[in-house]
Each structure stands twice: as C-alpha cells, then as structure tokens.
Image: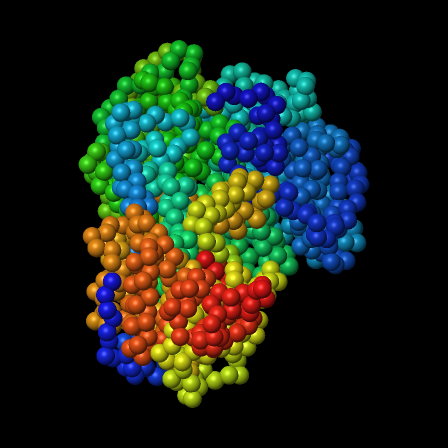
C-alpha cells in the first residue's frame, strides 16, 4: 500500500454538485457496456452455438442424405435445394426455441447478473442514473439479441451455399423464387423475426429488472414463451389465440408464399410492439422505484 | 383417393351446404364460418310459417300437386320484397334455412319450397321442365302475391327475386323466362344447357357428338332416384337416363328433352337483372355454363353481374358469407333500390395461406364489367411434335382430373401448391397423354377465361380426348392448373382432322419461369370412353391462345383495426406507466448553500421495509470535513440501510440526506463525490481486476485522466494477480480491489463498510494509515465497523446506532470518556453493558 497525496482535494465542484469531470451523459457508454457483456462466457458460448449450428446441420444432411418428403410439405423437404433454402430451414427450426433462448439470454441476464454480482449498486452509486443505466443496458442487450437473430441465418446462408450451392429458392409447395427475389424476401423474413422476438426480449428484460437471479429471468421468459405456445395449441380458445405473444412467431413464412402475405406479419408486429411497449414501460417504472438491496 | 360410396357422392349433388363438411374433413382446408356463424346469439329471430300450397301442372294443367313451403317473414318490417329460394337436387326446402333467414333479416319475405318430387312435396321430378316445375313456381308467385308480408308492384304481381343453388338456380332462370313478374334473379352454380353439361364437346360440335359425363350423371340421377330404379323421377325422365347411361351417347330425343329443361332454350326471354354466381371448382356446371347464361341475359339488354367463387359442385371453399353478401347486395339494389349492388365481375382468388390458422386467404378481385371468356387474348407458341397416345382396353385405368370432393385441392394450385394439390394422386397414366409446352414465362401470367388451341387428331373412328392445362415449374412436377378437363370427340379422324379446342374456363396465375402445358389424355375417370384399345396421333397445330382480364383488381384485404389500435393503446399505456408517479417532489430545496462545505448531514432519516421492519428511525447526524467517522452498532442496528440510502440505492420514507449541501436522490450528480464500499465487493467475475477498475471508471462518466488508477491499484496491492480474472481472487483480494475502486478519483467522501474484513493484521494496519492520511488531505471518511478497537484507533468521531436509532454521537474521546475502553462505552450505550 502506498501514500495518497492529492493537492487538489478542494477542487471546486460542478454546479449540479457533481465531482469535477463528472458528466452524466458519459455514464455507462454503449461501447463500455458492450465490452463488459461481450467478454462473458455465456455471450461467447451463445454465439459459438449459433455459428456452429448451421455447420452441424450441414453435416447432418450430408450424413443422412437428402430429406424425404413425408406427405405434408415443409421446409425440411427442400432444405438442401440451395444455400437460401438451407438458411430458411435453419431459421425455421431455430425460431421456436433456440432464438427465443438466445434473445431471452441477452435481455434477461443483463440487469439481473449485475445485481447478482453486486456490481449494480456501485454503478448506481457512481452515479449512473437508473433510467439511463436501464436504457443503455437495454440498447446493448437488444443489440446482442439482434446480432444473435442475424447470425444464424447469415451463417446458414454461408454454410448452405458452401454445401449446397447458390441457387433459386424451392418452396415446399412446389414453386421457386429467383435468388435475387429471394434475398429481398429473406430480408423481410429476418426483419420480421427481429420484431417478433422483441416481445421475448421485453419480457426477459422486465424479469431481469424484477429479480436478482439471471437464471430466473432467462428461464422465466423462456417458460412464459412455452406456456404461450401450449395455450396456442388449445384451438378451443379460438381467436383469443391471436393475442398470444407467440401466436405469430412463424408468420415470416408468409413471405415464402408466391404472393407475399403481409397480414400475418402486420398482426404479429403490432402485437409484439404493443406487448413490448407495456413490458418495457413496466421495467422502467419498476426499476425507478425499486430499492436496490442486492 | 378412393371414390366414396354412392351416398357420399349423392351428398355432393345436394348442394354445397352439407357437402362442405365432408370436403373440409377430407382436404383439411378450413372453411368460412358459414351456417354456424349465422344465427348466433344476438341475431334477431326469424318467424316462419309453413303451408302446403296446392298447384296444378302438367302439359294439360291437370295434375294436382301439393308443394311444401315455408315463408320466412321479413324482420323489422311488415312488408318486404319477396325472394323465392330454391334448393339443390336431392334436397328440400329445409336445406336453405340459413340462407333464407339471412335474407329475411335483410328485410325480405323469403319463400322456400320443396320442388315437386322432393321433400314433403308430392309429384315427380321433371328436371325443371316448363310443363311441371315452372308451372309450380308460377302458381307459387300467385300465392305469394296474396300474402300480407309481400310488397306488390301491382295486383297479383309481387316485387320478386329468385335465387338458389344448382337445381334451385335453374328454376330461377326458367321461371324468369316464363313469368314476367320475376324482377331479378341470382342463380348460383347452375346450368345453361343440360345436354351440353352431360355431353360436353369442347370442339363446339354439340352434345350429339359429346362425351358422356358418366360419373356426375350417375350421381345426379341416383340422388333423385333413391332406393328404387326410378325413384321419384317422371317415368319418361327415368327411361331417358337409363338409355343414355347404357349407350354413353346422347340420342336426339334425350337432347330435346334436356334442352327444354335448360335456360338455353329460352335464352332470349330472360330479360331481368341477373347475378350469375358460378364455382371455380365445378366440373358439373363449369364456368362456361354461367358464361352462357350471362351472355344470353346481357344480349337481351338486362344488367348482369358475374361472380366466380372458389367452391362449386366439386367442393372447395363455399365462401358462404361472401356469396350471401353479394346476393343480398344484388337484391337490395334491384328490388329495394338501395346500395351500389354488385360489381360487374368478381373473381375470388386464393391469395395465400394464413400461417396462423392454416386457412386459405381468399380475396375478391373485381372489375366493372364482365368481359366473357375470351377477353384480352394473346397466343403463346407451343412446342412438341406429334405424339402417339394409347386408349387402354376397357378405358382403364383412367386418368383423373376433376372428381367430386377434389375441388378444395384446386384452390391450392393457385398458391403455387401444385405438388401439394396432387397429394400423391395419379393424374395421368403413362402413354395415355400427349403434352405440348409453352416456353418458360418471362413474367407471371394470369389466365381469366378459357384458353383455346387447334389440334390435329388422327385415329380410327371416333376419338375422344380430354384437354387440360397444366402448370409446369422450372423444377418439380407439373400439376393441373385447375382440376378440370374439357372433353372433345373428333369424328372420322382416320385421315387426321384439325379441331379447335376450348379449354376449361379458369382463373389461374402462372408464375414467371413456369411453362403452360397442354395435355390431351385418352381417358378420364369422370367420362365414358370407348373400351376398344386404340392408338391415336395428336399434334398441336397452333399456339395456345390465353385470355386475361387485367381490369380485375383485388383491393388489399383490410387489416383488422387492432393492428393499428393495439400498439397505439399500448404506447399510451406505456407512457402512462412511466409518467405516473414520476414526480414525488419534496418541499426541501435540492441545494442548501449553507451546507456546501459539510460533507454529510443526515436529518430525520427513516426507512421502514415492505416487511414492516423499521430499519432506521429518525436518524440525524453530521460529518465535518477531515473527520474519520466511525459508524458503530450491533447487527441489525440499521448501519447498512443508512449507507444504502446514502448511496441512493434505497428510497427513504422520511428525512433527508445532504452531501455537500445537495440532497441525495437516486442518481443525484453529487453522488459522484462519494466513493463507497458497502456490503462487499461487486465485480464482473469474468474480467481481470485491472479491467474491472478500468471499465468501472469509464462507466461512471468521469474524465479519464482523473482516475488516479495507479494509486488505487497500489492500495489494492494485488501485484501480478491484477491481470487474473476476479473469479480467481480470494475474499481478501476482492476486498482490497473494492476499496481501491471506492478510492478511484479520490472522492471527497469515502464510505467504507467493514473495510478490514478478510485483511491480515499488517494489511489492517496499513489500511488504518491510509484512511488517516486520506482524511488529512481535507477529505472525509466514514467507516462502519464492528471491530471497536479498529474504530478507536482510526476514527476521530463516532456515531453509535442501535435498533435503527442514533444512541450516541460525537468525538470518540467524548464517547469513550476517560479511562474506559470504547468497547465498554459501546456496550453501555446500547444497553447491554454492565
């Protein structure tokens, strides 16, 4: 240990009472938060899985041969038709669970883990104002979640093109799209997937603010998605199912119809945005008035 | 697919209502709500009265027949225009109840009746003959004119519309021709010419040379016959059928008789406004039958609207609500002079699948006027040389085009679902068909109408062939554009004969890159073909002329209101959630200049947790510059809660904390002058100690140069461990790193909670010196501790807490008094001393 000498002990404070050099607009910059999150093992593992999965799938198709149609048309029947087809298939198998887990991981973990490590209180006492802390964390978490949702189809496109070649998209129902047209549709699909996953992100974020346990937040969000899926299977609920958060999760497949159908995606986007707005508002409200005792 | 039993096929004939359910189950394509949605709770009840009306008919008007009727009284008014609603073949007046109630609710007096030979009516079936069924209908009009619920145009002349499906649609056309009192008709999926329907010939050579539509004819006849050979058929009708079914050829007698039951025979006499509804999945009465009716009526100068919908006798989406709406709008305009009526031409198209319900989305494309089946034609060259095709012995196995019940599959073809539409069904048998392809389309092509082509056929005797149009994708299997075939019969083709073939009328979209394929097959399961084995030669001698109606426009289906409303409401709700309760303003000013040099003043601080535990009660004390203050108290005294409130982590219930005169609120900028270490360290375990401090400093909004990182790191004394991840640290190492973090930037007020936990004695001693020196620079230190000896040696002042209250405060020397140890004084103060 050493001596502490500082001649500027009485440096004049700023008008708002802040220490010299303190600027609230510099607190928790996005870049710093991104670095803090990026070097976490679960971030790296999540991206490693998303990057590796397409190659695993390619291996599976190479090993097992071309998929055989089993009567009902589905994307797996045409998964090996081209790189774009393969990317669509990968997105199809990942939408229901893998992407949900990835998005819930990044958004559910972000505040709860800080609370778990006790680092949250030092950030708040620094002080990083609560609303700002939440906003910066939300932006970074959504950024990582979006990167996750983008990573899978992009890597699948690469893996699929290497393995199955570049070409037109074959639709399970028999038609084809030219590759150029299909890229545009792919953009619509990925864009919609991002919006559709927003509700998962918001739910996880709210839970993250509410609990100190990262696992609880991530698991809670995934669990609620599963419950929503189960309720969605209860056809007796009729049109009430339209308002389940996961009901429109696969509506991006409407972009694979010969004539692009916007209706389902419009409904899904409206629902996702509506839920997200309320969930995020609750998160901010909750965090603002909460006593941080972790 | 196996052909179902006769009963099943009979059902198909009965009109679409009952048949629908079967189709839905078979093809798993869901339907519009139909009969269920109609008449749900909340709909006004419709009052009816049933009566047997006695009529006289027959060529000599001498046959007494009792017609079973039900009159649905108009809802909401005493008198309304009348609508006569006929039923399908094999059914009765009860089948049309839902349609009748819907029209009655729209204000019409609706008469449903069982045609002679059906239901509870007496008499025999004469196939809508002018001598029988038409006479019955005319006397029903007489009867209607006497009913008090019916509005009259003149004495004995009701304001009258007629509608109905199939058999019930034909009687509307026939009656309109024979009785001027009919004001408007809306015949649905019905025929123009029965001979052409049962003996079609797409070369235009007429029914005498037609190909017998044996499957449908059999279904048709047996649904009227019931369990006996001739059932309730007029004996002459029965004999007629038996003869043609046996020979498979139409004799002139049969043609003449059937012709008399056909609107075609009275085409020049139907002069009332008409809505012609025809089905796109209808191989019994195909679209060309509706076209013939529409053209005939239009020729007479009456306005005609044409609707092609997805269903028909083959099955498919009945679009019940849409068709009911069209019929109602039509009668509203023509009988009630209300509304805009129906567009001149409406075609419903499968626009896609709703991915959430797996239902086919059907949208209606409309145009101002009906252009017929050959509008906007252009010709696509056909490739393919002359081909030999075989007629198998016995005409078996036969290729399959349209069949009752397959209609639902047809609509999927329009979705690019050709392969799906096939459903593994063998379509053409090898060697039995000749194919001619166009070049791949450079742009999507929608055919609306009937394509035509000239072909040359060479073969012995009469050659029956079945012309079909297929959709051929660039990769993948060809599939029928619509499941319907146009039969042709080429007579005396030994030397080869050229004929013009009109393909089935359809509305179908071919994608860009696809080819159109003309298929000419020797067999079709629905038709009678010769049993003799034979070989023919077929060649296409012209291009394929395809019609289009570009004027047809489908308005985008409107999104439900909640698509816009829900997010708007949600955003408003979100704003309310965030804004509500935001300003819990207090009376006290944010800054008290008189306290600017007082590092800390706590006044009346109180905190009660949600559990009810009163953690801090009315705590007040003050810390001056240069002091090292010890905060003492047993466990649960409220020390940590107080420090958390000081850091802005916990909202106090009452009282206030001022740092250098600024009131502490969560996130108050003045907190940047506070360095704190409370209740253990908080680090990101996956980062090294150095990175933790570095990122922390960059995260708290301070200018980079003022961190004094090196001094802090020296206090931590971690040496090489600084670059290991924090998760590998011992508790003491974390403790020292956390104190270093608290001292980053050399804050004016340093708060340390149990700083010596986990430190070894030399480190404790050094820590003590560090704190004393720190205060000596004019800064202030608050140490909370339970090690009283520590406090005694380090602190200048002390505050003693117990049970959330301050029990003593002042210089350590005063608290201790003379000659006592702090420990004794402390125990005495908190009430546990000797």
Looking at the rendering, which quadrant does residue B555 occupy? Answer: bottom left
Residue B554 position in % (x across, y down): 43, 53
Q: Which residue is more in the foreground, A111 or B794?
A: B794
Can residue B716 be seen here? The reply is yes
Q: How is the image coloured?
A: rainbow
Q: Which residue is more in the foreground, B585 or B739?
A: B739
Looking at the rendering, which quadrant does residue B433 occupy? Answer: top left
Q: Which residue is more in the foreground, B578 or B802?
A: B802
Up-down relation of residue B830 to residue A272 (above or below): below
Q: Which residue is more in the foreground, B115 or A248?
A: A248
Residue under the point 58% across and 51% down:
B325
Can residue A153 be seen here? The reply is no
Q: Is residue B279 left or right of residue B782?
A: right
Q: Is residue A279 left or right of residue A145?
A: right
Residue under the point 23% across and 31% down:
B383
Residue under the point 53% across and 29% down:
B26
Residue under the point 66% across and 32% down:
B91
Residue B573 position in % (x across, y down): 52, 65
Residue A211 position in % (x across, y down): 48, 54
Tell how many labels.
0
Pick the quarter of the image with the C terminus of chain B.
bottom right
Q: Residue reaching furthest front? A: B819
Residue B286 position in % (x across, y down): 48, 36
Looking at the rendering, which quadrant does residue A50 occupy? Answer: top left
Up-down relation of residue B26 to residue B354 (above or below): above
Q: Residue reaching furthest bottom? A: B594
């Amino acid at each position: 240990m050493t001596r502490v000498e500082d001649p500027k002990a009485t440096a004049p404070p700023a008008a708002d009472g802040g220490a010299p050099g303190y600027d609230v607009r510099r607190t928790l910059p996005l870049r710093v938060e991104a670095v803090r999150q990026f070097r976490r093992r679960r971030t790296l593992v999540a991206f490693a899985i998303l990057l590796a999965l397409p190659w695993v799938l390619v291996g599976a198709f190479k090993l097992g041969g071309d998929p055989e149609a089993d009567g009902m048309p589905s994307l797996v029947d045409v998964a090996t038709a081209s790189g774009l087809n393969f990317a669509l298939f990968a997105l199809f198998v990942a939408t229901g669970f893998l992407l949900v887990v990835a998005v819930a991981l990044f958004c559910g973990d972000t505040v709860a883990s800080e609370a778990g490590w006790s680092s949250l209180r030092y950030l708040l006492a620094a002080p990083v104002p609560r609303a700002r802390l939440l906003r910066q964390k939300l932006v970074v978490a959504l950024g990582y979640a979006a990167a996750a949702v983008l990573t899978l189809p992009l890597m699948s496109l690469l893996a699929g093109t290497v393995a199955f070649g570049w070409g037109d998209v074959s639709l399970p129902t028999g038609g084809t799209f030219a590759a150029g047209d299909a890229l545009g549709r792919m953009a619509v699909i990925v864009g919609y997937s991002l919006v559709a996953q927003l509700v998962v992100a918001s739910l996880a974020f709210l839970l993250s603010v509410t609990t100190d346990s990262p696992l609880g937040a991530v698991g809670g969000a995934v669990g609620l998605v599963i419950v929503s899926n189960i309720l969605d299977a209860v056809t007796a609920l009729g049109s009430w199912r339209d308002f389940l958060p996961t009901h429109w999760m696969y509506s991006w497949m409407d972009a694979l119809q010969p004539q692009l159908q916007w209706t389902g995606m419009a409904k899904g986007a409206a629902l996702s945005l509506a839920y997200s707005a309320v969930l995020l508002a609750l998160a901010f409200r909750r965090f603002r008035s909460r006593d941080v005792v972790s | 697919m196996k052909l179902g039993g006769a009963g099943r096929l009979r059902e198909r004939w009965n009109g679409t209502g009952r048949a629908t359910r079967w189709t839905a189950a078979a093809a798993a394509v869901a339907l519009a709500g139909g009969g269920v949605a109609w008449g749900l709770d909340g709909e006004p009840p419709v009052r009816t009265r049933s009566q047997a009306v006695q009529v006289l008919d027959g060529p000599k008007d001498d046959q007494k027949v009792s017609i079973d009727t039900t009159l649905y009284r108009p809802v909401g008014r005493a008198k309304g225009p009348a609508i006569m609603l006929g039923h399908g073949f094999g059914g009765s007046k009860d089948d049309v109840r839902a349609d009748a109630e819907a029209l009655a609710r729209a204000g019409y007096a609706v008469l449903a009746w069982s045609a002679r030979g059906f239901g509870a009516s007496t008499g025999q079936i004469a196939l809508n003959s002018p001598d029988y069924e038409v006479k019955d209908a005319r006397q029903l009009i007489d009867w209607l004119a006497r009913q008090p619920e019916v509005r009259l145009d003149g004495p004995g002349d009701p304001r009258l519309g007629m509608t109905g499906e199939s058999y019930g649609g034909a009687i509307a056309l026939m009656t309109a021709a024979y009785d001027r009192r009919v004001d408007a008709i809306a015949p649905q999926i019905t025929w123009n010419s029965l001979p052409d329907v049962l003996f079609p010939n797409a070369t235009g050579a007429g029914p005498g040379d037609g190909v017998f539509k044996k499957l449908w004819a059999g279904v048709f006849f047996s649904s009227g016959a019931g369990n006996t050979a001739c059932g309730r058929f007029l004996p002459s009708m029965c004999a007629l059928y038996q003869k043609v079914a046996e020979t498979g050829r139409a004799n002139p007698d049969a043609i003449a008789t059937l012709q008399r039951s056909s609107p075609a025979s009275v085409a020049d006499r139907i002069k009332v406004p008409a809505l012609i509804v025809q089905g796109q999945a209808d191989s019994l009465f195909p679209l060309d039958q509706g076209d013939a009716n529409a053209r005939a009526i239009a020729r007479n100068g009456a306005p005609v609207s044409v609707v092609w919908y997805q269903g028909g006798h083959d099955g498919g989406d009945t679009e019940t609500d849409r068709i009911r709406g069209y019929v109602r709008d039509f009668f509203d305009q023509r009988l009630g002079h209300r509304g805009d009526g129906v567009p001149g031409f409406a075609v419903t198209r499968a626009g896609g699948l709703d991915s959430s319900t797996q239902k086919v989305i059907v949208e209606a494309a409309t145009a101002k006027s009906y252009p017929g089946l050959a509008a906007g034609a252009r010709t696509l060259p056909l490739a393919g040389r002359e081909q030999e095709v075989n007629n198998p012995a016995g005409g078996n196995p036969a290729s399959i085009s349209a069949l009752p019940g397959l209609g639902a599959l047809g609509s999927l073809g329009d979705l690019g679902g050709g392969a799906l539409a096939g459903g593994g069904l063998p379509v053409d048998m090898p060697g039995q068909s000749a194919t001619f392809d166009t070049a791949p389309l450079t742009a999507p092509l929608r055919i609306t109408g009937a394509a035509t082509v000239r072909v040359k056929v060479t073969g012995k005797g009469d050659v029956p062939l079945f012309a079909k149009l297929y959709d051929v994708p660039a990769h993948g299997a060809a599939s029928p554009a619509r499941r319907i075939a146009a039969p042709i019969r080429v007579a005396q083709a030994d030397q080869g004969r050229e004929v013009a073939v009109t393909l089935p009328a359809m509305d179908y979209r071919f994608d860009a890159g696809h080819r159109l394929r003309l298929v000419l097959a020797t067999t079709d399961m629905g038709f009678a073909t010769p049993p003799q084995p034979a070989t023919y030669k077929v060649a296409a001698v012209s291009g394929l002329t395809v019609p289009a109606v570009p004027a047809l426009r489908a308005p985008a289906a409107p999104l439900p209101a909640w698509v816009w409303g829900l997010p708007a409401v949600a955003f408003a709700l979100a704003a309310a959630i965030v804004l509500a309760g935001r300003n819990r303003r207090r009376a006290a000013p944010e800054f008290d200049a008189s306290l600017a040099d007082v590092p800390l003043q706590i006044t009346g601080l109180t905190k009660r947790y949600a559990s009810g535990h009163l953690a801090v009660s009315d705590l007040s004390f003050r810390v001056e510059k240069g002091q090292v203050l010890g905060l003492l108290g047993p466990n649960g005294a409220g020390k940590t809660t107080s420090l958390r409130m000081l850091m802005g982590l916990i909202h106090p219930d009452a009282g206030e904390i001022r740092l250098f005169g600024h009131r502490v609120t969560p996130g108050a900028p003045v907190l940047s002058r506070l360095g704190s270490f409370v209740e253990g360290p908080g680090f990101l375990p996956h980062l090294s100690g150095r990175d933790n401090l570095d990122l922390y400093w960059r995260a708290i909004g301070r200018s980079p140069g003022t961190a004094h990182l090196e001094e802090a790191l020296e206090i931590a004394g971690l040496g090489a461990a600084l670059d290991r991840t924090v998760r590998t640290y011992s508790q003491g190492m974390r403790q020292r790193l956390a104190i270093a973090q608290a001292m980053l930037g050399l804050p004016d007020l340093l708060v340390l909670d149990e700083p010596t936990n986990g430190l070894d004695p030399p480190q404790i001693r050094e820590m003590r010196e560090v704190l004393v020196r720190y205060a000596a620079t004019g800064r202030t230190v608050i140490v909370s501790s339970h090690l009283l000896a520590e406090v005694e040696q380090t602190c200048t002042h002390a505050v003693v807490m117990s049970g959330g209250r301050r029990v003593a405060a002042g210089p350590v020397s005063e608290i201790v008094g003379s000659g006592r140890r702090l420990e004794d004084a402390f125990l005495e103060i908190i009430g546990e001393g000797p």
